[in-house]
């Protein structure tokens, strides 16, 4: 009698976790759609990220109050949430700085190294992924590398590459921390996201004051504020919340593999919105990545 119950629980986790992971990748891949127009107008990165996080915190806070959820956390939970906030903040900062050196689609694509980093970190934590997951990681990363060859042969600034890889590393640590920390296991996904983004808002407000940057420099039109609101809703609230859902339901490694939809989305945004070329390499890379993810889901489902 126990086995059917176990199978039902695992199946329910898969039904919740896999779609959440896909949504995470798609929404995070929308970063360039909202950020690049603001940066092109001269808005400071600190200001963009401050308003992005602040709007998200206000919306999440209002939701928590309307649903009468408690904001109460323990000191131990506060410490973990502080670490999560600093990791997520560092990842965003590195990504946006990378946009100054390399194409936005390429920068967001290179972040997809993080599934490999997650898998390696999990091995050190004595959680070894199964062979289908390793195969999916290798194939999706290979697909992403093929995608990056579609940039027309232009020179790639190593600083931009280093910033993108730095973003990938701290994002991987963020995912693993959510998955492995027992202190925050009972915290709702909404509350976790609220405190994580609150840390980011405070950090970027501090950076603005220290750099003596005009907080609204380059943010002048209604369209600019809509872009900031878009950043707060999709690549921030939705992406972070669904990442927590996916990680808790299917594990850190599988959730990270589903992040392949992030570079796919970023490349499509670059092609459709910013005129970046859609080459055969990009199409082939996207095809390989989708097949690999489908294989992982079909073989590892319980």
Image: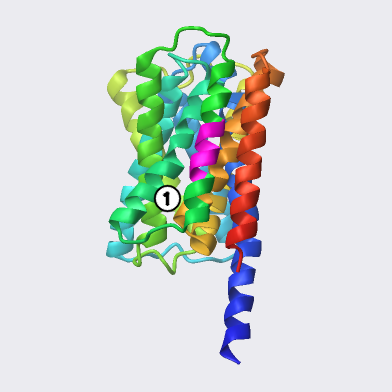
Query: Which residue is located at x 28 percent, y 54 percent?
Result: 124
Image quadrant where residue 286 sits: top right
Q: Which residues are magenta?
A: 137-143
**Does residue 150 sit above or below 65 in this rendering?**
above
Task: From the viewer's perspective, tell me whether residue 264 is left or right of residue 204.
Answer: right
Q: Compared to 265, does 214 lie above or below?
A: above
Residue plotted at (38% across, 43% down): 117
Q: Residue at x 53, y 61 (%)?
A: 250
Residue 289 versus residue 66 in the image, above or below: above
Percent position (x, y) of residue 214?
A: 41, 17
Q: Position of residue 22 (x, y in %)?
A: 62, 47
Task: Classify 10 Å Cα crowding around label 1: few (below 14), some (14-19), many (20 and above).
Answer: many
Residue toward you, 232 or 154: 154
Q: Which residue is mark 1?
A: 175
Q: Is residue 184 left or right of residue 250?
A: left
Relative depth, front residue between 246 and 283: 283
Give the x, y percent position of residue 40.
Answer: 54, 12
Q: Is residue 277 magenta?
A: no
124 or 236: nearer the viewer: 124
């Amino acid at each position: 009698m126990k086995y059917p119950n176990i199978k039902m629980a695992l199946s329910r986790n898969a039904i919740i976790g896999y779609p959440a992971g896909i949504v995470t990748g798609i929404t995070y891949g929308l970063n360039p759609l909202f950020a690049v127009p603001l940066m092109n107008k001269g808005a400071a990165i600190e200001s963009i990220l401050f308003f992005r996080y602040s709007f998200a915190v206000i919306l999440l806070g209002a939701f928590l109050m309307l649903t009468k959820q408690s904001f109460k956390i323990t000191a131990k939970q506060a410490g973990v949430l502080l670490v999560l906030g600093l990791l997520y903040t560092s990842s965003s900062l590195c990504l946006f700085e990378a946009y100054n050196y390399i194409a936005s689609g390429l920068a967001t694509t290179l972040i997809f190294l993080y599934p490999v980093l997650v898998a390696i970190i999990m091995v050190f934590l004595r959680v070894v992924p199964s062979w289908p997951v390793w195969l999916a990681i290798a194939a999706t990363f290979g697909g992403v590398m093929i995608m990056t060859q579609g940039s027309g042969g232009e020179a790639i600034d190593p600083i931009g590459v280093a910033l993108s890889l730095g973003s990938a590393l701290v994002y991987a640590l963020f995912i693993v921390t959510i998955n492995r920390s027992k202190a925050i296991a009972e915290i709702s996904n909404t509350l976790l996201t609220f405190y994580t983004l609150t840390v980011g808002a405070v950090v970027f407000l501090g950076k603005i004051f220290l750099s003596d940057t005009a907080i609204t420099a380059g943010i002048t039109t209604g369209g600019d504020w809509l872009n900031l609101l878009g950043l707060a809703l999709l690549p921030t609230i939705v992406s972070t919340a669904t990442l927590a859902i996916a990680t808790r339901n299917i594990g850190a490694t599988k959730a990270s593999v589903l992040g392949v939809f992030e570079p796919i989305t970023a490349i499509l945004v670059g092609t459709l919105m910013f005129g970046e070329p859609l080459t055969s390499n990009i199409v082939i890379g996207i095809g390989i990545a989708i097949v690999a993810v489908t294989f992982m889901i079909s073989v590892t489902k319980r």
